[in-house]
Amino acid sequence: MRYFIFSLVMFVAVTSVTFADEKKYAPISLADPDGAAYPFCRYEDCLKFCQKHGHKNGYCYQDYCWCVL
């Protein structure tokens, strides 16, 4: 049991270091002026929104705007 816990801790440590340099993405649901979510994501609106909030790029996926952090 002790070796299992040690193996699990080492696995988590190695994977967290391995993936530390990857780009991170966060989903952002854009809202229209009335506060309702857009029925679909528009690339131009998503890009403007992301750049306005300090992100380099943004893209649409499954009706959500994803900004590159």
Image: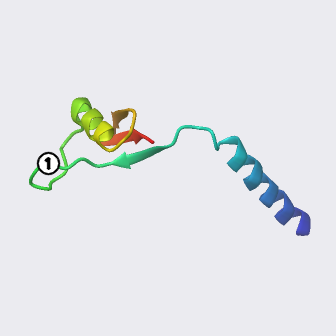
Residue 36 is drawn in which quadrant?
bottom left
> The N terminus appears in which quarter of the rendering?
bottom right
Query: What scheme was used to colour the molecule?
Result: rainbow
**Front in this rendered view, residue 20 or 5:** 20
Q: Secondary structure at mark 1?
A: loop
What residue would you read off at disc 1? 32
Give percent across and percent down for residue 55. 38, 39
- Look at 26% across and 40% down and name the residue there: 49
Is the residue 69 above or below the residue 56 in the image? below
**Front in this rendered view, residue 17 or 29:** 17
Residue at the bottom extreme of this rendering: 1
- Look at 27% across and 37% down and name the residue there: 46
Q: Is residue 61 left or right of residue 4?
A: left
For the image, the number of numbered tags is 1
Residue at the left extreme of this rendering: 34
Residue type for callout 1: Asp
Give percent across and percent down for residue 3. 90, 63
Is the residue 43 above or below the residue 9 in the image? above
**Front in this rendered view, residue 20 or 42:** 20
Give percent across and percent down for residue 54. 36, 41
- Look at 33% across and 48% down and name the residue there: 28
User: Label 1: few (<14), some or many (≥20) within 10 Å?
Assistant: few
Q: Is residue 7 left or right of residue 62?
A: right
Q: Is residue 19 left or right of residue 45?
A: right
> The C terminus appears in which quarter of the rendering?
top left
